Image (cartoon, grey):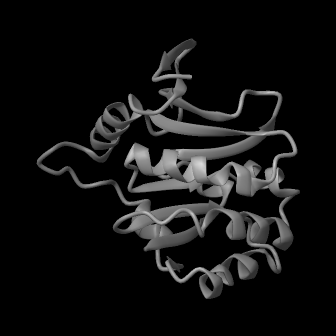
Amino acid sequence: MVSLEFVTEADGVVPGFPLLRLRTGDARPGPVLQCDGRRPGGEAFTLTWNAAHGADPKRWVQGLADCLSGLGWEHWRLSRDSWTLFGGLDAQALDAFADAFWPVYRPVGRMRVLLDIPDEPGLRDAARAWTGRHKHLRFDLKLAELLQPPETEKDGSLLARLRRAVTSNVRALPQRIHHGHRQIRTGED
């Protein structure tokens, strides 16, 4: 099941939630994982998925879903600028994303996803309508609870667990990792 909640840029960085950014252009298709230690609140991860310019989303969403599953993330945040890949920030773009991505992305267990969608007439209603078409989606997260400081567990902080999950799973993925100003290649390209 995927639990969803809305956020906006005004909410700032939600601690421990890696950012997923979808983009198109001249960049080589596929994932780029960035570890950015300069963000407010400490180190954060950003996964940028480069889609081929003009490519039908149904041609690349399976790769994105496999990549997210392979990372082992329990939660992530979809950036607002990702909606431009689907033609802009409107109900039609939200539906284009939903109808391409949610049928192929079915994580095991509970996944928490934050959607950066402004509180404008029709936009959030369009996203809420996804639950009627995709039965594994629920809008049941509470942003206020997510903004509370994470509890420390026996195996370390939320950030430490995220870092371990990313580093252990990233080796199996063909991608480039950016750390600071250096680019490191892992896997097979």
Q: Position of residue 34 (x, y in %)?
A: 54, 29
- Residue 184 drawn at (x, y percent): 50, 15
Quadrant location of the N terminus in the rendered image: bottom left
Going by the image, does 54 lie left or right of 4?
right
At x 28%, y 38%, the residue is: 160
| Along the line of sight, the residue nearer the viewer: 41 or 159 | 159
Query: What is the quadrant of the C terminus in the image?
Result: top right
Q: Closer to the camera, 173 or 24?
A: 173
Q: Name the residue at 40% across, 32% down.
A: 172
Q: Residue at x 30, y 54 (%)?
A: 150
Residue toward you, 84 or 134: 134
| 155 relative to 123 in the view: left or right | left
Relative to 68, say whether 164 is above or below: above
Q: Could you tell me residue 68's position as x and y percent?
A: 49, 49
**Camera-nearest residue between 64 and 122:** 64
- The extreme left residue here reads 154
**Is there any visible trace of residue 16 in the rendered image?**
no
Determine if residue 75 is in view: yes
